[in-house]
Image (cartoon, rainbow, N blue to C red):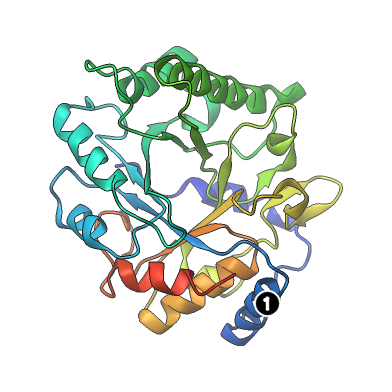
Amino acid sequence: MRKHTKGLLALLFSSALAVTAGSSSAGAATAASTTAAASGARGLEIGVPAYVWPGDPMLSGLQTATPAASIVILNPGNGDSAFTPAWQAQADTLRAGTTAAGGHTRVIGYVHTDSGARPLADVEASIDNYLKTADGRLHVDGIFFDVVSRDCGTANSTRDYYYTLRQYVQTAMNAIDPAAPELVVDNPGTAIADCYLDPAHRTADTFVTYEGSYADYTGGGWLGGNVFNLTAGYYSGASFDPSGTSFWHLVYGVPDAPRMQTALDTAFARGAGYAYATGATLPNPWNTAPSWGFAAETSHAATLG
């Protein structure tokens, strides 16, 4: 599995861009969550990276969790291993789960992009691995692009690389099932340049704008917003997020269940529509279930908003 260091280089730029990125206490997060709930804001949902193989106990836990997670990422060998009938059956089983909002779990397939350096043809082949199956059916609801650059690139060239990929996913899924809504997620693991959310060239439905430790998340590691530009610095990105689903926070190294709730409260207060907290740590915090179980997270998230 890919190592989870992609956000670290981006942090080197924070001193030039950051507005105050102070820590959030449990009390502050809870107060902000209460305010958001009172205003009628959309609630928080759980999205889980499950970087394990079919039949793993982590996936069994996700299948039996009530409410179910809203999103599950499947990852066959960094997206390079065949999406075989065993993987397809696993995806179909997960998609039968019912979430707190009454919908079904959406499963998305992992594809790495090497910060925009991976050839488009290679990325598209990885997308086809999930979408163009022998039975001609969709077994996933979209694609999760990992190791995503957070910068626009010269003349928006890097942004346009990811916009091309989103269009490719949309076209491929529409050809198979025109009625199927696609979900595209970009994961820079940190705040992303707001050019990626330009309505005319938006590269994803949802962006993972934090992937890191609980200590950093509740300390000085939060940069102060989900998006940035060189003029405004870091800011919430709420203006790009009318549905409340644009941002996703992934937090590992969470010490216990009470602080899992703190992590989720903090994610909601910071504008995330999706979040996940686990006690597991590097090198791969996404290959085991949290000790408190998935239902503890989905149930707590359902109380927010």
Q: Quadrant of residue 292?
A: bottom left
Looking at this rendering, what residue extends furthest in the right direction?
231
Looking at this rendering, what residue extends furthest in the bottom direction?
27
Quadrant including the N terminus = top left
Helix, strand or loop status at disc 1? helix
Q: Position of residue 46 (x, y in %)?
A: 43, 59
Instruction: Please give left or right for residue 59 compared with residue 269 in the image.
Output: left
Q: Position of residue 44 (x, y in %)?
A: 53, 63
Say which amino acid is labelled 1: Ala
**Crowdedness near tag 1: few (<14), some (14–19) or many (≥20) residues, C-alpha within 10 Å:** some
Residue drawn at (25%, 35%), measured in percent from left and top?
A: 76
Question: Total marks drawn?
Answer: 1
Q: Quadrant of residue 57?
A: bottom left
Q: Position of residue 230 (x, y in %)?
A: 81, 45
Is 3 located above or below residue 253 in the figure?
A: above
Residue drawn at (70%, 63%), measured in percent from left and top?
A: 224
Is 207 located above or below residue 35 in the figure?
A: above
Quadrant including the C terminus = bottom right
Residue drawn at (33%, 26%), measured in percent from left and top?
A: 138
Residue closest to the eye, 19 or 106: 106
Q: Position of residue 55 (x, y in %)?
A: 13, 47
Visible residue check, residue 23: no
Is 136 located above or below residue 262 in the figure?
A: above
Residue drawn at (69%, 49%), measured in percent from left and top?
A: 241
Which residue lies under the disc numbered 1? 32
Visible residue check, residue 164: yes
Is 105 located above or below residue 114 in the figure?
A: below
